[in-house]
Image (tube, grey):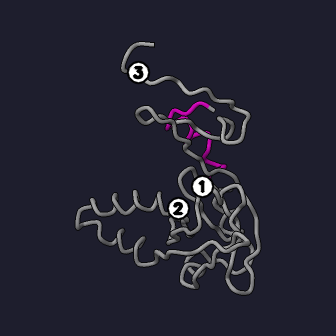
Amino acid sequence: MPPGFPPIPQMNPWAPGGLRGAVENTSGAQWGRVGMLSGEFRYTLDDKGRVVLPPKFRRELGEAVIITRGFDGCIFVYSKKEWVGVEKDLRRLPLSRRDFQRFLLAAAVDVEIDRQGRITLPEVLREHAGISKEVVVIGLIRRLEIWSEARWKEAVARVQRQAPQIAEQIDISL
């Protein structure tokens, strides 16, 4: 190996924490796992306004999350680590975009994940998302989105009609 280059770590992709289901990233001489949130899960909101976060996401999210208003009538859920990046991006926005900052930040709440993997959705966010009982939680790479089941069905139907044209416009191979 040429001098100055770190050795390539030996990995078993099928071992816990291996390559399967994750993207591997390098930073200098250290390798770090970068998780990706994906999937669709259906839950029922309990009487206290709590929803379960899918078990497969909990390790990536940590013990608490930041939730706020999302686009298209959903709720965004960020790990605290991801939220730091969102805040950094929001700070860089020009004053002309302060309404957008207000939209996201006024409703942002730091929420603990309880032992059963649930978070409490404040009433203002439940109203924003039209959530009363049936909930869909989806993974969207860096964040989760929480939708009312009815709105999610509408959103999927809308995109499904346009998917071929969208894929062609963004030049993605599927």
> Which is nearer the N-term, disc 2 or disc 3?
3
Q: Position of residue 115 (x, y in %)?
A: 70, 72
- Does the magenta portion include 10? no
Number of residues whose C-alpha sits closer than 10 Å to that of mark 2, classed few (under 14), some (14–19) or many (20 or more): many
* Foreground disc of the pair 2, 3: 3
* The magenta segment: 159-173
Number of residues whose C-alpha sits closer than 10 Å to that of mark 3, classed few (under 14), some (14–19) or many (20 or more): few
**Residue on which disc 3 sits:** 5
Which residue is rendered at x = 63% and y = 60% of the image?
A: 155
Asked whether disc 1 touches disc 2, contact meaning CB atoms under 8 Å apart, the reply is yes
**Residue on which disc 1 sits:** 60
Q: Is residue 40 left or right of residue 163?
A: right
Marks 2 and 3, how far apart in space? 33 Å
Q: Position of residue 146 (x, y in %)?
A: 63, 67
Q: Is residue 34 left or right of residue 44?
A: left
Q: Give the SS element for disc 2.
A: strand
Q: Position of residue 11 (x, y in %)?
A: 64, 29
Three-letter code for the amino acid on which mark 1 is drawn: Glu
